[in-house]
């Protein structure tokens, strides 16, 4: 499809530029004070670029809210990687993808940011001012293209800049909720080494990191090289008391799934163990009665069979004993930056970055249900009468032996499902730049970047082979059978299990050219301008095996390979206008031409008023867009299962179950549209007593429409007869079903196709305070605190039939109203210390399985202290503890983990020692 999209009017942008809102948002982390005794002198201020503007400037405070986090600030948080530090920022709200929350899903082990809760793919991530490449792994059932922050070498970071309002007018698609720009070190002289070692108390999640940096320069040439390594052991759910059992009831001897407070009626516990179990559940022949065994056995006599019972645990499987809390991970990286001045007005540069991330995640052994390929009723697995592991077979009943059908079965003999992934992120840039007459500057570059995601999947079981193994296999002249109730010959297990490697590649090539400088002078100063063009090619290739595409994988993991590609041509312009001595206006616009959906133009207007030397008032209005991710357009089929048990209204004879859904791309999708309105103030408290004390308050509103959505499976089932054909795909009727009077077969899968329809309004308030004070005898203290209040978060969910459901999200399940963080740091001579505090507010939990309301999920507070000493041997030694009080995450009944991994953090107390030396 190729259509020209009409840009929205500039009217509101002009209005915002003339009548500024009254509030602003800015920095969060405490700034590292300068070393004591450093002399001060008058220096010439050099111009520099700040994220959110292509025009170089002297004043760090821009009309738009920009947070700047230094390497020292990152170290003060106590986190060993940048992704954990970024997730602790208060405006990074709602759910993010983290190694503990992604589990064995589509983006296993990945780490993302989710500014304002608008989506993990709605924040633009830059590395040194140019786009970071998405991971090959797609999030959100395989459709979202997200930036995996793990590709950033943490120790190589010079600073992080975060623009907290929309910026599509400057940077294009994805800059909806803001921009995250990672500035890596570009200048270094000598050799530096940084190593750390740490572990959790009482468990073994040992972590080792190492970083080396070397740099040198001549009069015209500079070279910088970095290498980084990290390794962390896996932490299992069974290792911690709060996550070792999916049975979250206080009274685990009760026969009831739901536990309620007798006074308040609130749901205070629930049993989330799986009914897909080992030993398997089976039907007594000729009846609907289900039996199982209390423990694994090679002698499954019918006399020992028992009914499933929550009280005894028979017929229920605690998968938390076999799944990962934090994955094992190893990373290796390399970087090089070369710059050469050919003359006073011409330079060239080359930038190389490579990161490999290897992750291992474990999930419980594969569950086999009635949706898979058995030979029995509705695809149930059949254990033939001849099998020695059939409790009603010929082994026990002779000629009267009968085959049995399994109700559910978990393939414990095959071991846990293993997601063994390797992600590679090569990136290189070559370019030229220089100066033009009248102090104008220019730069042009070519970039190649790729994000790959290879999953070896060594713990895969294959549907068709399980039934064959139950029927009996001739191996070495022996007939061997699979045992659904206990141990079996390893050769049988090897027959129906193996590896199923899949891979995905996201490749981006970028050509860009820009110029900037002063156009002319006004009484209040020079008018700055920047213009540029970009051409970008993106390609996503997802390769699946035949087993995936034919649905021959036990427990899901199905899907189809596909290829998607697009070209994007862009042009942008920006003006910085000093209207008055104390008033600056920024105007920007960007034109984009996408090969797959058409053209769009987005504007931005911002202004800043220095009302007094201590008061800055600023505001902005911008329009942003999010182009459909390639998978949303080109995916041919991504398979998942509903989170809830659903009934088929047209086949009431069928039990409820988790239905298979197949998500399919839609090439007619259009961009998502967003209006962002921001305003705020920054106060630098005057006077000697409070010099260095600043406050900031900010308000920002995102008004979104045309958001990509799809119908829920339950809605599709209810409206099957009025929706287009093919939305509910059923199996062919069997002769027995026809004889019984049924007119439709059982459900094979529900198709969930994407379309543009939803709307969102998101309003937040940001609050910040920073204070730096030096005392002659006590040293330098610095305090930085920030908080975000989610004032309003509304979503209009629109079905394909036009039915709108309004949802108020703020303060509901997984969306706390308040988040905050603070850092208190101190430095005197060779000593330094800091305490970082992260706060995640409480929120109401969801309805538990329709049985009632849970109590509010409590707030979480984590405290990370550390202390460091600069030894006489030029080595700084740092000792610290993350989560020093060893606080468990808040109890959350709706997740089998016992906590909410999308919001809260589970890492127990973790000690570390870091050594840093410069040679």
Image (spheres, rainbow, N blue to C red):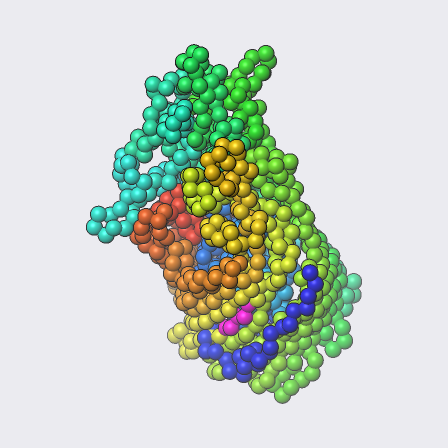
Residue 676 belongs to magenta span: yes
Between residue 190 and residue 380, name the one nearer to us: 380
Dominant SS in magenta: strand
Residue 636 belongs to magenta span: no
Q: Position of residue 221 (x, y in %)?
A: 73, 58
Instruction: Residue 435: name its quadrant.
Output: bottom right
Between residue 534 and residue 2, name the one nearer to us: 2
The residue lying at 48 percent from left, 70 percent from top is 700
Q: Is residue 118 above or below residue 421?
A: below
Q: Is residue 119 visible?
A: yes
The residue lying at 45 percent from left, 68 percent from top is 763
Give the extent of the magenta segment.
674-678
745 displayed left or right of 183:
left
Q: Position of residue 653 (x, y in %)?
A: 42, 39
Instruction: Residue 596: name its quadrant.
Output: bottom right
Instruction: Residue 835: name its quadrant.
Output: bottom left
Q: Position of residue 558 (x, y in %)?
A: 57, 40
Q: Is residue 619 above or below residue 806?
A: below
The extreme right residue here reads 342
Q: Quadrant of the N terminus?
A: bottom right
Q: Is residue 418 visible?
A: no
The extreme bottom residue here reads 523
Q: How many marks?
A: 0
491 displayed left or right of 835:
right
The residue lying at 48 percent from left, 34 percent from top is 739
């Amino acid at each position: 499809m190729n259509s020209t999209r009409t840009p929205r009017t500039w009217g509101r942008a002009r209005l915002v530029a003339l009548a500024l809102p009254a509030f602003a948002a800015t920095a969060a982390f405490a700034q590292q004070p300068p070393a004591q005794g450093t002399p001060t002198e008058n220096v010439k201020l050099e111009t520099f670029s700040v994220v959110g503007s292509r025009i170089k400037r002297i004043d760090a405070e821009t009309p738009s809210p920009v947070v700047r986090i230094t390497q020292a600030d990152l170290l003060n948080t106590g986190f060993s990687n940048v992704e954990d530090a970024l997730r602790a920022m208060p405006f990074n709200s709602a759910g993010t993808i983290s190694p503990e929350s992604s589990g064995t899903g589509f983006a296993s082990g990945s780490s993302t940011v989710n500014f304002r809760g608008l989506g993990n793919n709605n924040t633009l991530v830059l590395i040194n001012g140019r786009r970071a490449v998405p991971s090959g792994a797609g999030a959100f059932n395989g459709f979202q293209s997200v930036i995996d922050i793990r590709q950033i070498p943490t120790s190589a970071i010079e600073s992080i800049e975060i623009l907290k309002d929309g910026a599509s007018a400057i940077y294009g698609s994805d800059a909806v909720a803001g921009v995250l720009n990672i500035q890596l070190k570009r200048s270094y002289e000598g050799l530096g080494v940084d190593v750390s070692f740490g572990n959790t108390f009482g468990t073994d999640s040992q972590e080792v990191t190492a970083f080396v940096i070397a740099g040198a320069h001549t009069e015209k040439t500079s070279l910088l090289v970095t290498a980084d390594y990290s390794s962390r052991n896996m932490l299992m759910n069974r290792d911690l008391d709060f996550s070792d059992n999916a049975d979250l009831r206080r009274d685990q001897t009760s026969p009831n799934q739901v536990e309620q407070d007798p006074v308040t009626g609130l749901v205070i516990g629930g049993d989330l163990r799986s009914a897909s179990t080992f030993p398997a559940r089976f039907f007594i022949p000729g009846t609907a009665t289900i039996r199982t065994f209390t423990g694994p056995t090679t002698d499954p006599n019918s006399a020992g069979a028992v009914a499933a019972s929550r009280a005894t645990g028979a017929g229920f499987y605690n998968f938390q004993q076999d799944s990962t809390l934090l994955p094992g991970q190893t990373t290796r990286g390399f970087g090089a930056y070369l710059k050469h001045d050919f003359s006073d007005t011409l330079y060239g540069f080359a930038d190389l970055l490579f990161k490999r991330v290897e992750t291992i995640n474990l999930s419980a052994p594969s569950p086999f249900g009635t949706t898979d390929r058995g030979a029995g009723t509705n695809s149930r697995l059949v254990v033939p009468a001849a099998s020695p592991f059939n409790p009603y077979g010929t082994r026990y009943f002779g000629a009267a032996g009968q085959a049995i059908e399994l109700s559910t079965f978990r393939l414990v003999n095959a071991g846990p499902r293993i997601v063994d992934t390797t992600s590679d992120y090569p990136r290189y840039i070559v370019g030229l730049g220089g100066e033009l007459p009248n102090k104008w500057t220019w730069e042009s570059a070519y970039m190649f970047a790729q994000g790959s995601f290879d999953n070896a999947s060594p713990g895969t079981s294959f549907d068709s082979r399980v039934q064959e193994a139950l029927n009996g296999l001739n191996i070495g002249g022996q007939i061997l059978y699979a045992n659904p109730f206990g141990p079996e010959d390893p050769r049988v297990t090897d027959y129906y299990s193996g590896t199923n490697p899949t891979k995905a590649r996201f490749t981006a090539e970028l050509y860009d050219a820009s110029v900037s400088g002063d156009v002319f002078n006004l009484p209040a100063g020079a008018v700055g301008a920047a213009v540029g063009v970009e051409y970008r090619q993106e390609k996503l290739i997802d390769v699946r095996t035949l087993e995936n595409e034919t649905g021959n994988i036990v427990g899901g993991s199905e899907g189809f390979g596909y290829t998607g590609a697009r070209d994007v041509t862009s042009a942008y312009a920006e003006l910085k206008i000093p209207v008055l001595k104390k008033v600056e206006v920024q105007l920007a616009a960007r034109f984009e031409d996408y090969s797959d959906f058409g053209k769009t133009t987005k504007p931005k207007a911002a202004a800043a008023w220095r009302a007094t030397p201590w008061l800055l008032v600023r505001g902005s209005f911008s329009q942003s867009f999010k182009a459909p991710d390639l998978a949303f357009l080109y995916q041919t089929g991504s398979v998942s299962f509903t989170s809830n048990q659903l009934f088929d209204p047209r086949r009431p004879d069928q039990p409820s179950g988790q239905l298979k859904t197949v998500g399919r791309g839609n090439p007619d999708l259009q961009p998502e549209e967003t209006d962002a309105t921001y305003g705020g103030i920054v106060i630098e408290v005057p006077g000697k007593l409070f010099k260095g004390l600043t406050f900031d308050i900010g308000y920002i509103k995102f008004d979104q429409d045309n958001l990509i959505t799809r119908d829920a499976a339950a809605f599709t089932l209810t409206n099957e007869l009025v929706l287009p054909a093919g939305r509910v795909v059923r199996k062919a009727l069997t002769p027995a079903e026809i004889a019984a009077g049924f007119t439709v077969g059982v459900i094979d899968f529900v198709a969930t196709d994407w379309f543009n329809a939803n709307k969102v309004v998101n309003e937040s308030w940001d609050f910040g305070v920073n204070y730096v004070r030096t005392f002659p005898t006590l040293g330098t203290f610095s305090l930085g605190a920030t908080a975000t209040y989610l004032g309003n978060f509304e979503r209009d969910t629109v079905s394909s039939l036009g039915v709108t459901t309004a949802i108020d999200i703020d303060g509901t399940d997984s969306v706390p109203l308040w988040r905050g963080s603070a850092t208190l740091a101190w430095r005197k001579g060779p000593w330094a210390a800091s305490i970082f505090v992260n706060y995640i507010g409480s929120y109401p939990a969801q309805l538990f399985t329709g049985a009632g309301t849970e109590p509010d999920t409590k707030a979480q507070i984590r405290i990370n202290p550390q202390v460091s000493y600069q030894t006489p041997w030029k080595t700084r030694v740092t000792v610290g503890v993350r989560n020093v009080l060893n606080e468990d995450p808040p109890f959350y009944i709706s997740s089998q983990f016992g906590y909410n991994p999308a919001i809260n953090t589970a890492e127990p107390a973790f000690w570390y020692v870091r050594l840093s030396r410069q040679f």
